[in-house]
Image (tube, rainbow, N blue to C red):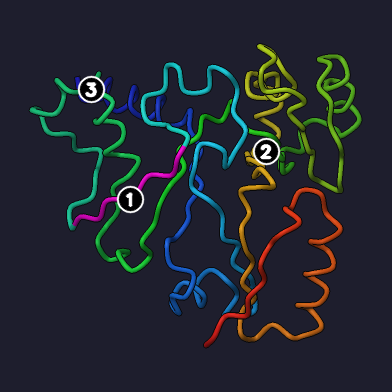
Amino acid sequence: KHADTREYLETELHKFGIISLTENPHNLLMWSHYADEHNGIVIAISNSEDTFSFSKNAFKSSRIGEKKAVRVRYDNKRPSHDIPDECIFSICEDEFFRHFALVKSDSWMYEKEHRFLIPTTESDVAILNISNETISIDEFEKYLHQRKIDFICVGSKYIFENENINFPFNNLAKVLNDDVVKSMGSLLFFKRLMPSAIQSIYCGCRVSNEIIDEVIRAVRQNNRFSSDLTFYRSGE
């Protein structure tokens, strides 16, 4: 009973990817842990249904996902594989899945995390890091051509673009359903922000003026960013 429940839970949760954010761009611990000791950047984005572009049926049968980021719940007792008997009856309820996807130890409460829970089928890009050497690169690329999977090769990485998330069997769907591709290494899935969703960029207090100027120039020349972005330098 419990084994079946765990397997079902893991199967359903693995259909989703998580994008983690914080509500506080000024937290010193966050800058230290996640922004290269104040040498990195923080990107402020909106939290709305227009933050990302989704297919028409993206969340039609979703167990946990929605178009807005959801606040993480912190607890001193984390979800585990030891599912109590009294919880088994709720396996078909969405809240059961949301509990496992949104609860973290209260040791991490300072992060003030919010999470986008997005089906991997809604990804815009997948990157495959090759680690399997049993198939030669030539054989693998020949296989991709035969399966009509479009790709870009950069060193040992293969990039798969999702040309249209509304196509029932688009390029990324082929990748997701292909055991050979998945056996070649680790797949990472990414979601592109809508340009209007990117509101501002904070540079760490240890970022030089030259790099800040370079960042501003690069952003202004990239049509994936809004033209009315605000730039800040974060204080230490």
Give the SS element for disc 2: strand
- The image quadrant that residue 99 belongs to is top left
Whether tag 2 and tag 1 are in contact, CB under 8 A, the answer is: no
Is 71 one of the magenta-colored residues? yes
Give the SS element for disc 1: loop
Q: Which residue is mark 2?
A: 185
Determine whether 74 is above or below 141 in the image: below
Q: CA distance from mark 2 to mark 3?
A: 32 Å
Dot label at residue 91: 3
Residue 183 lies, in percent from the top left, at: 66, 30
Give the SS element for disc 3: loop
Residue 56 lies, in percent from the top left, at: 57, 18
Depth check, mark 3 against mark 1: the one in front is: 1
Q: Which residues are magenta?
A: 68-75
Query: Residue 112 versus residue 173: which sits nearer the camera?
Result: 112
Q: Which comes before the other along the chain, label 3 or label 1?
A: 1
